[in-house]
Image (tube, rainbow, N blue to C red):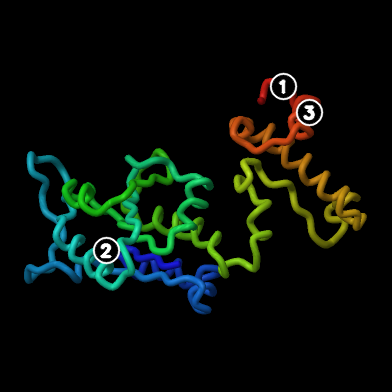
Amino acid sequence: MRFDILTLFPEMCETVLGESIIGRARAKGALDCRCHNFRDYAEDKHNRVDDSPYGGGRGMLLKAAPIYRCWQHIVRESEGRPHTIYMSPQGKVFTQEKAAALSQKTHIIILCGHYEGVDERLLEKIVDEEISIGDYVLTGGELPAMILLDSVARLCKGVLAGEECFQEESLYNGLLEYPHYTRPEEWEGEKAPEVLLSGNHARISKWRRERSLERTCRKRPDLLKLARLSPEDKLYIQEKCGGGFL
């Protein structure tokens, strides 16, 4: 899968993209992540990409033309029109469901805004959707872009060892993940649950599902209304947490 990041701070993005799982996936060719500084596409001698907004007001606004030329350069070397996302607090809030949907794309362009935003004409011309990572404002779109890319990329083929690495994680199936334990068997007087040491895979699977249901009831009961629950799950929730959660 290919990602292209349009930004004024490519080094900031490369610092994130070059590390850990995403960095290794890039190195082996499972991901193609490219950062583009749209200042390189400015045409005046000062390489300006911003100007004061019409109508007055504080701050500066990113101009349409440099970003558009950068976007066009990427499109010309692509097979088809890439799906273009603008990171914006005005967009729909990012979810695991959206990450899964985006992971089915073959090529995504992410535009990182800055200052007071971007000329609306540019957004109307190239952006397919606006996405927010939460109801708060940051100084730029680079950090949100890295969050979106990381969340989507890890679902792509070849990035993690296998689908089992994420299929039981929090939010993937609508529930929070069960608790985890590792060696030593006893730490600070607390023992790991006996069932996890039993080797009985059926018992372990049942224990994990029940702990996942209990944790979701306690921490994020709002998720239960949309989670994929079996009749046995619903009965367990009613017995342990009360029926008001469903």
Name the residue furthest front: 80
Name the outermost residue toward the bottom: 28
How dense is the environment of label 1, judged by Cα within 10 Å: few (below 14), some, or many (20 and up)?
A: few
Please tell me whether mark 2 sits on a helix, a strand or a loop: loop
Q: Nearer the viewer, mark 1 or mark 2?
A: 1
User: Is disc 1 in contact with disc 2, using a CB cutoff of under 8 Å?
Assistant: no
Q: Is residue 149 left or right of residue 111?
A: right
The quarter holding residue 233 reads: top right
Residue 118 seen in this snapshot? yes
Q: Position of residue 160 (x, y in %)?
A: 60, 66
Query: For residue 212, which numbered disc appears in the image?
Result: none
Whole-angstrom CA distance, mark 2 to mark 3, is 53 Å
Residue for badge 2: 8
Of marks 1 and 3, the one in the foreground: 3
Which amino acid does the dot numbered 3 rest on? Leu
The residue at the point 30 percent across, 61 percent down is 81
The residue beneath circle 3 is 235
> Among all residues in the image, which is located at the extreme top?
244
Question: Does residue 246 sit above or below 47 in this rendering?
Answer: above
The quarter in which the N terminus is drawn is: bottom left
The residue that label 1 is drawn on is 243
Gap in angstroms between the C-alphas marked 1 and 3: 9 Å
Query: Residue 124: percent from the left, percent from the top?
Result: 21, 47
The residue type indicated by label 2 comes to: Leu
